[in-house]
Image (tube, grey):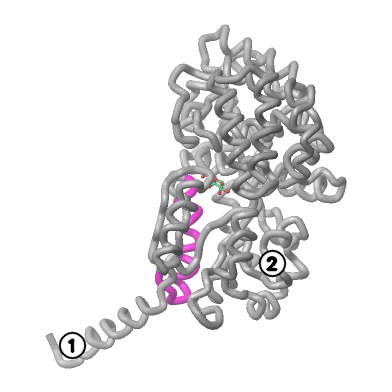
Amino acid sequence: MTKRLKMTVAALAVMTVGAQAADVEVLHWWTSGGEAAALNVLKQDLEGQGIGWQDMPVAGGGGEQAMTVLRARVTAGNAPTAVQMLGFDITDWAKQGALADLNSVAESEGWDAVVPDALKAFSKYDGKWVAAPVNVHSTNWVWANKAVLDANGISVPQTWDDFVAALAKLKEAGVTPIAHGGQPWQDATVFDAIAMSTGGSEFYKKAFIDLDPETLGSPTMVEAFKRMDTIRANVDDNFSGRDWNLATAMVINGEAGFQMMGDWAKGEFLNAGKKPGDDFLCFRFPGTQEQVTFNADQFAMFDQGGAVSDEQAALAKAILSPSFQSAFNVVKGSVPARTDVSDEAFDACGKQGMKDLAAAASSGNLFGSMAHGHAAPASVKNAMYDVITAHFNGEYDAETAAAELQSAVELAQ
Ligand code: GAL
């Protein structure tokens, strides 16, 4: 090695050590193919700024396991730099004073003017920005295999009755009507759409956001659970415990007709090289065409003692930059968390998602997703999960389930 080359190697080694000191450690649950592809957009953006990425993935859709790992890390005095988080979980950590104050970044980047109020309700606590929203997902979508629908003479169902008729046709043809993964958060994701479709906006809000006991135990809730029985009768025998992305794969490969799932499912179709409109269809769950039940992934920065660190500030800034919001959400299946990002780069489903979100927000039909921690705090959410899953697995009939939901929610508060 020449002397000059030796010096360069030494300089590089120093730089590498320096870069490691400026790493961000990010705890998240984006481990499916589509999710990992989206996460890469963020990793590369940061690497381009010389900020290294220490990956802390915790598998498990919906993030329950990730939140368990987070609690253990914080208890051990070893909080990660940044954590993917949903809705009321952000508020809970902020209340405990665990999150860094991002106001300096928010002010210099003008976040207040471009982040919609529905997200700010969770990104801010007590006047302080405590999380940077990366996207807006919504749960009341259906994903369909177009060839399977065409082969069975099924057009996009507009009503619950249309949907039930489509399920019957698929069953008759020997196709699994609904691809589902029997995990509590997935059962609850389906219930988000079923409850909204059964009772409408006012019912959804009273039950899941206001936690009104009468609505929770109402005949409409009984009807919603009866519709869950119909869903249960149209899943395959091996649904129990299946991961959501494996259910999406069943629709991708034509084993199943439909999946009721949030728009992260689109990331799986895209990752498999499938095209919306040609290979797969996206549409709002029948009877929820006007509504959007949303969840937004945000990155909360844990207070490392003192002011927000340079790396945390850089991560937060990168997350909310308009070009990143477009590039990331095109891959993830979600829509931007800023209101001023063009829909130009988005496919038909993404464009519809952006239009639906704006329309629902202005017509008063935008609500936080019960299943994804945007309607009520985790204690209540988990109580709801228990009842929804027990009913889905045949432990309760619809009447008992509504009564159990009412009392479980009361106890959990
Ligand atoms: C949601 C999250 C999405 C997606 C999904 C499945 O809670 O908001 O980004 O990751 O879980 O893992």
In the foreground, 214 or 298: 214
Q: Crowding at label 1, few (<14), some or many (≥20) Cα neighbours within 10 Å? A: few
Task: Kindly identify the amino acid type of the residue bearing the numbered disc 1.
Answer: Lys
x and y percent of residue 356 in the render? 76, 44
Can residue 278 be seen in this snapshot? Answer: no
x and y percent of residue 7 in the render? 22, 90
Q: Secondary structure at mark 2?
A: strand
Q: Secondary structure at mark 1?
A: helix
Residue beneath disc 2: 125
Task: Kindly identify the amino acid type of the residue bearing the numbered disc 2.
Answer: Tyr
Instruction: Give the number of the disc on residue 377.
Output: none
Q: Is mark 1 within 8 Å of ligand 1?
A: no
Picture quadrant of residue 76: bottom left
Q: Is residue 406 above or below residue 230?
A: below
Magenta highlight range: 34-52
Q: Which residue appears at 63% of the width and 11% of the height?
A: 168
Position of 159 with respect to 397 (left or right) is right
x and y percent of residue 38 in the render? 50, 53
Can residue 44 be seen in this snapshot? Answer: yes
State the residue lying farthest toward the front: 411
Q: Is residue 70 above or below residue 53?
A: above
x and y percent of residue 408 in the render? 64, 35
Instruction: Give the number of the disc on residue 6.
Output: 1
Q: Which residue appears at 47% of the width and 37% of the height?
A: 245
Q: Main secondary structure of the magenta part?
A: helix
State the residue lying farthest toward the bottom: 3
Q: Crowding at label 2, few (<14), some or many (≥20) Cα neighbours within 10 Å? A: many
Q: Which residue appears at 20% of the width and 91% of the height?
A: 4
Position of 323 with respect to 1 (left or right) is right
